Image (cartoon, grey):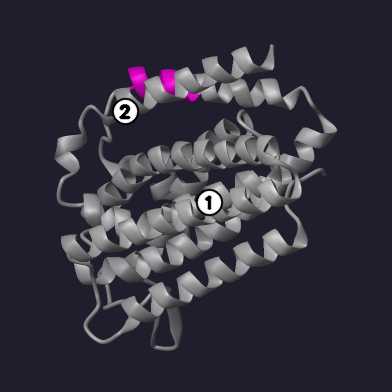
Amino acid sequence: MNSIGTPWLWGSFAVIVIAMLAVDLLYQGRKGATTMTFRQAAAWSLIWVTLSLAFNTGFWWYLKGTLGVEVANTQALAFLTGYLIEKALAVDNVFVWLMLFSYFGVPAQYQRRVLVYGVLGAIILRTLMVFGGSWLVTQFQWLLYVFGAFLLFTGLKMAFSKDDGGDLGDKPLVRWLRGHLRMTDTIENERFFLRRNGILYATPLFLVLILVEISDVIFAVDSIPAIFAVTTDPFIVLTSNLFAILGLRAMYFLLAGVAEKFSLLKYGLAITLLINLWVNQRAAR
């Protein structure tokens, strides 16, 4: 599959992501850092956004020197568009996490552990989905129309769907997981598993982790096709996607206390997605 990404670009991206994840995890893993205050979450969110923009600037500068300013402008704009789409859709994902933590009664001091593994799992799943999608697009060009339809469907669904979460325990998936996991009735500190009388049990915290990962896959089905409607380059799609989700944990703690103020969020996201679809259809003519 064709890509603007060179070994130097891929290597730089990998080093930045691994280094920042290590710093983030070490900072959060220090004694007493079981959660984030609003100020800390705002600071970390700003750090992740600044790092993403700095990467895009460096990416533009590298392409300008190697392939010319026109290519640099086009690819940097594609990165920024993909980043903004994923960042916007990720807000809805955060609100789903809020609902999960509230329903299962997960204390704030234990949410950090779930989100750490949730974001790491999301990185792996998104990477597999991006490369799988890139391969499919190179083999079947007509899939671009399918991705465009996904973009349209996502915008319309967000505009007209009702915010009726219902009883989470009545969801078929939750009932199935509870019926097939040997699970304790209570949360046991930050542990996902424990042994009682030699028998291994999962805790409700592990069930929440599974649901967090499943919710990310569901939202990725919306967001990744949306980015493929902008560009099919796997380097642009993956880097913009991962930079957007790396700050999800900080975004969660930032928005956790102000969720009720975002009742009109879905309408803004729907308009953004539909405008993006219209712009790309015009550009494709």
Amino acid under label 1?
Thr
Which element type, helix, strand or loop, lies under badge 2?
helix
Residue bounds of the magenta highlight: 154-161
Asked whether the viewer can see residue 181, the reply is no
Is 260 located above or below residue 32 in the figure? above
Identify the residue at image location x=68%, y=17%: 284
> Which is more N-terminal, label 1 or label 2?
1
Which numbered dot is residue 266? 2
Which numbered dot is residue 168? none
Give percent across and percent down for residue 188.
28, 77
State whether the magenta stretch is mostly helix, strand or loop: helix
Is 218 located above or below residue 196 in the figure? above
Give percent across and percent down for residue 142.
76, 22
Asked if the stretch drawn in magenta spans residue 158, the answer is yes
Q: Nearer the viewer, residue 119 or 27?
A: 27
- Does residue 64 appear to the left or right of 168 in the view shown? right
Question: Mark 2 against mark 1, which lies toward the viewer?
Answer: 1
Give percent across and percent down for residue 161.
34, 22
Quarter the C terminus occupies: top right
